[in-house]
Amino acid sequence: MDDEAVREKVAKFLERHSNQPESASRITNLIRYLDGRPDYLEPLDLVPRDEIEQRLLEIEKILSEQRKMRPNPEWHFTSLQISVLMMMPLSALQARPRDDFVLRLNLDHLEPIFDFFLRPAKETPTDSWTTPQNNGKKRAISGPSAPKIRSNPGSPGHCDKYRDKDEREKCYDQDHEHWNNTTHRHLQTTKIATALTLISPGNQCLYRLHADVGSSDKAWNMIALSPLLHSWWSKGYFAFKYVGTTPVKDHDNLSEITLQFRWMPRSPNPNGTRMIKLEDQRDPKKSLLDGLTHYYGDDISPPCGAECPDCQHTAHVGIHSLETNHRICSGDLIRVRRDTQFAFEFKSMIELQWGFICAAALSGAARAPEFLRRLEDDEDEEGEDAAKRRINK
């Protein structure tokens, strides 16, 4: 649209609303939009295109070794497993531990650990539009959390020492439970926690999630979200990418963390457990990455057609900022504040959720987490095996 067309539309807007009762509000909203300057950083590919071949070569080595130790010599990665491996930094993929048995366990534990993260809340908001105001919270390694109280973004209220017990309890209640608050659940978390090293390699704070009973139920493992954004996060509609941390001027113990908002692709296949042939990943018609053509929150790309199911699901997903009236786009920067002593832990959890959501979105697991195997399923199988061993004795 050229400048003249824009001027004409603005003139018609002002003329149309000049004598209406709500004109002042509408014109104020227009001025707020025109004055708005959202901070923005050009988003990069989720998986760098120039590294795909190198990644596939490393994953082929892993596949070869895994087939040697599994009963099925024709074993294939699942969509979720290959998505996690593709999302790993290339350097981490090349320097992976050479203990193939541990890698096997970690690959097999991806389903239950993603089930932890993607398990939806019992109640989902029904409104289709919202603003990213911070009145809900999400934990990185458990189900959704969204208390109904308001936490003022950018204030000391975001810091751990200012969070009172009632506020945290509301967060936990929205999760319907504390996750890591019993010895049994702590042992469950510990059992599969090493799989986190595939999702967020080199993350120095992963141990904090299972160091002790209740160790993951901390403010540095929470972020404030509106109820709608909270529900969309656990569905893999969007994710936050860590950008950087800076000290807050005139606040010795406060740090500002910059996050990049990223809309996620919608996988055409919702089954994250389906088998993926690695040789197909070099074929543009069969490649997992090349099949990701639709993104949530995308209001630029023209629709494919009335019958496209992905267009129907992505076209009506979007949020606006009340501060600027601008639609939130992939690449928009968001800033939150934390006590400096917890800033590194918060950064680590953001990096972990980035790995979770990207892999869940790429694989399709975010669309239908009910396909994923739960940890309880493994425990049931282990219990049956133990019973059989006792009977055989």
Image (cartoon, rainbow, N blue to C red):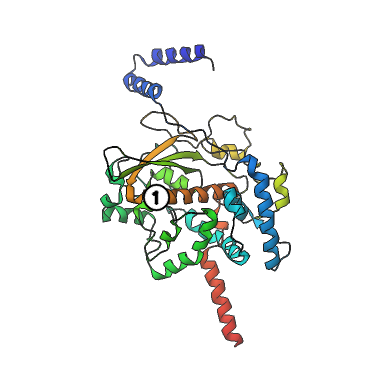
Disc 1 is placed on an element classified as: helix
Percent across and percent down for residue 339 are 31, 48
Percent across and percent down for residue 78 are 64, 56
Percent across and percent down for residue 223 are 38, 47
Q: Quadrant of the C terminus?
A: bottom right
Taking the image as shown, residue 28 lies to the left or right of residue 351, namely left
Snapshot quadrant of residue 250:
top left
Q: Amino acid at mark 1?
A: Phe
Snapshot quadrant of residue 169:
bottom left
| Residue situated in front as seen by the camera: 256 or 307 | 256
| Residue that sits furthest to the bottom in the current view | 393
Rendered position, 100 above or below 289? below
Q: Is residue 76 among what the camera can see?
A: no
Taking the image as shown, residue 241 lies to the left or right of residue 311, namely left
Rendered position, 32 above or below 321? above
Percent across and percent down for residue 16 are 40, 15
- Total numbered badges shown on the rendered structure: 1
Q: Quadrant of the N terminus?
A: top right
Q: Is residue 243 among what the camera can see?
A: yes
| Residue situated in front as seen by the camera: 91 or 79 | 91
Residue shown at 51% from the left, 67% from the top: 376
Classify mark 1: residues with Cα within 10 Å, few (<14), some (14-19) or many (20+).
Answer: some
Residue of label 1:
344
Taking the image as shown, residue 366 lies to the left or right of residue 145, namely right
Residue shown at 36% from the left, 32% from the top: 322
